[in-house]
Image (spheres, rainbow, N blue to C red):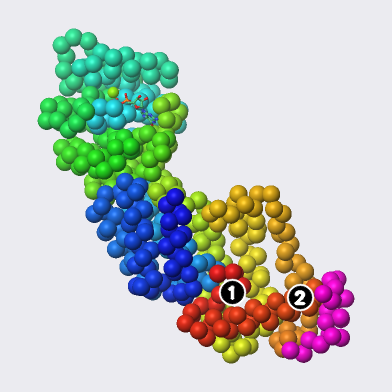
């Protein structure tokens, strides 16, 4: 999977305190490859990785997360930003509000018209009228009628010699007369971009001056979707994009490409053939989908929240001078604990969730450790060297543990300190070790 690929390339970043030009290059190559796999347009994938590189270079890596995870976070946030940052509503101005659908045949216009009517009826209390402007195929009119019946929304249609412009105009007139405050105009598409189709929909636009033009596109069409979007946008200057068929195994790279090329918001996504299968577009979620990375982002976010940069800097100094004490150890443990339930944290690491399902991780894993440290005198905490047998016995009794546990902790502490000292005086610049990085 994409995530595995990223993880693999991020291994190269492991052990680096800062993200540097050298360690970022290989990672970005993977990111770019991954985006291409997700159907993101080549040029866009390239410029995207440039932006990510700029952002990543020189970033301090939080001691609680791996540099690779930081990269994932940067990539994720950048993806979300590129796709618009926040969700955008449909424009419901006008009385009636007139919404025009555009897109190729089979993209999902008719289905989405039904979905949108249902959505705005139930969520915004609208009283919709669906309009069948696909005059070339009688079956298309029937299809819309069937959908209308399911959601109890009337369908305006004409058989005979009226053209789409005339039908659309007549439908709006009829809506006004019947107090319908929302008109959704479904149009005919072609299998490919075609001058006649473009002329027709441009004429409908000119005649009815819609409040909102929505371009419907099949997310499975991948790279082609970008060209189609561009052509439609050049002709219609549409207001938003509807990405359909996201229920398939498509990764949704089209969302990123379309957004970058036409710079119009994606407003909804279709996730099935049923009329309920409609979701408001969330850039963050789409970024997750494109990266396929589970909850690693929230792990990084939580770590970030809890990270105290000053404290880390102090710690680093102490490490270099070999002054790391049990008090520091205790505050590290408290930082880790602040990040939340251990099992939750572990489960957010891709691949770990399943493995941990049946294993009992003790949420109080640190309880004994804390009790032991609390039973030490301030002097003992700062100078662990003075912890002789008598002192250890006293600490065991005081903490309600036993001498073996106390010995084990002191041994672990010594080992950790040794290891961290090596790391902090070596080429790595940040404190590592306690978090297992
Ligand atoms: P139109 O030609 O643009 O009007 O497209 P239709 O609305 O007729 O849809 C074409 C086909 O795609 C139909 O079989 C729909 O059921 C199907 N379809 C539309 N939207 C979705 C979707 O979000 N998911 C899936 N799986 N199928 C969809
Ligand atoms: Mg149709």
Q: Main secondary structure of the magenta part?
A: helix
Report crowding for label 2: few under 14, some 14 to 19, many 20 or more residues within 10 A (C-alpha): few
Report crowding for label 1: few under 14, some 14 to 19, many 20 or more residues within 10 A (C-alpha): some
The residue range painted magenta reads 385-404
In whole angstroms, how far apart are the C-alphas of marks 2 and 1? 17 Å
Residue marked by disc 2: 408
Residue at 38% of width from left, 18% of height from top? 148
| Residue 272 in sight in this render | yes
Q: Is residue 11 left or right of residue 383?
A: left
Q: Quadrant of ligand 1?
A: top left
The tag earlier along the polypeptide, 2 or 1, is: 2
Residue at 27% of width from left, 35% of height from top? 215
Q: Is mark 2 within 8 Å of ligand 1?
A: no
Q: Is residue 317 left or right of residue 268?
A: right
Residue 433: which numbered mark, if any?
1
Residue 69 location, x and y as percent?
48, 62
Q: Is mark 1 within 8 Å of ligand 1?
A: no
330 versus 345 height, above or below? below
Q: Is residue 423 left or right of residue 161?
A: right
| Residue 81 in sight in this render | no
Cβ atoms at labels 2 and 1 below 8 Å apart: no
Residue at 55% of width from left, 69% of height from top? 437
Q: Nearer the viewer, residue 114 or 260?
A: 260
Element on which disc 2 rests: helix
Element on which disc 1 rests: loop
């Amino acid at each position: 999977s994409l995530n595995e690929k990223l993880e693999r390339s991020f291994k190269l970043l492991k052990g680096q305190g800062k993200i540097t030009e050298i360690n970022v290059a290989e990672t970005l190559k993977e990111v770019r490859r991954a985006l291409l796999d997700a159907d993101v347009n080549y040029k866009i994938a390239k410029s995207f990785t440039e932006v990510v590189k700029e952002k990543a270079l020189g970033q301090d890596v939080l001691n609680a997360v791996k540099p690779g995870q930081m990269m994932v976070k940067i990539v994720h946030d950048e993806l979300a930003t590129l796709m618009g940052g926040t969700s955008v509503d449909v424009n419901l101005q006008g009385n009636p509000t007139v919404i025009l659908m555009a897109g190729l045949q089979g993209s999902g216009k008719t289905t989405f018209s039904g979905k949108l009517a249902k959505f705005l009826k139930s969520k915004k209390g609208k009283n919709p009228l669906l309009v069948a402007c696909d005059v070339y195929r009688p079956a298309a009119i029937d299809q819309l009628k069937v959908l209308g019946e399911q959601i109890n929304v009337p369908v305006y249609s004409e058989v005979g010699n009226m053209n789409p412009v005339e039908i659309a105009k007549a439908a709006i007139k009829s809506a006004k007369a019947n107090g319908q405050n929302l008109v959704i105009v479904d149009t005919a598409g072609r299998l490919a971009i075609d001058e006649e189709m473009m002329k027709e929909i441009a004429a409908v636009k000119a005649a009815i001056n819609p409040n909102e033009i929505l371009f419907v596109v099949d997310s499975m069409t991948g790279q082609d979707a970008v060209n189609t979007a561009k052509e439609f946008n050049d002709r219609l200057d549409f207001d938003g994009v509807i990405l359909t068929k996201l229920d398939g195994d498509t990764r949704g790279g089209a969302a990123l490409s379309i957004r970058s090329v036409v710079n119009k918001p994606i407003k909804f996504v279709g996730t099935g053939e049923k009329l309920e299968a409609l979701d408001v577009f969330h850039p963050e979620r789409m970024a997750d989908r494109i990266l396929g990375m589970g909850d690693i982002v929230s792990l990084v976010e939580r770590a970030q929240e809890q990270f105290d940069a000053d404290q880390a800097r102090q710690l680093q100094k102490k490490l270099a001078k070999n002054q790391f004490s049990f008090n520091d150890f205790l505050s590290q443990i408290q930082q880790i604990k602040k990040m939340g339930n251990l099992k939750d944290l572990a489960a957010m690491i891709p691949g770990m969730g399943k493995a941990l399902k049946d294993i009992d991780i003790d949420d109080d894993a640190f309880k004994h450790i804390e009790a032991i440290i609390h039973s030490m005198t301030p002097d003992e905490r700062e100078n662990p060297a003075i912890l002789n047998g008598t002192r250890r016995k006293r600490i065991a009794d005081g903490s309600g543990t036993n001498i073996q546990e106390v010995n084990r902790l002191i041994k672990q502490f010594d080992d950790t300190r040794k290891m961290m000292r090596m790391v902090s005086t070596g080429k790595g610049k940040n404190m590592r070790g306690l978090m297992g990085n």
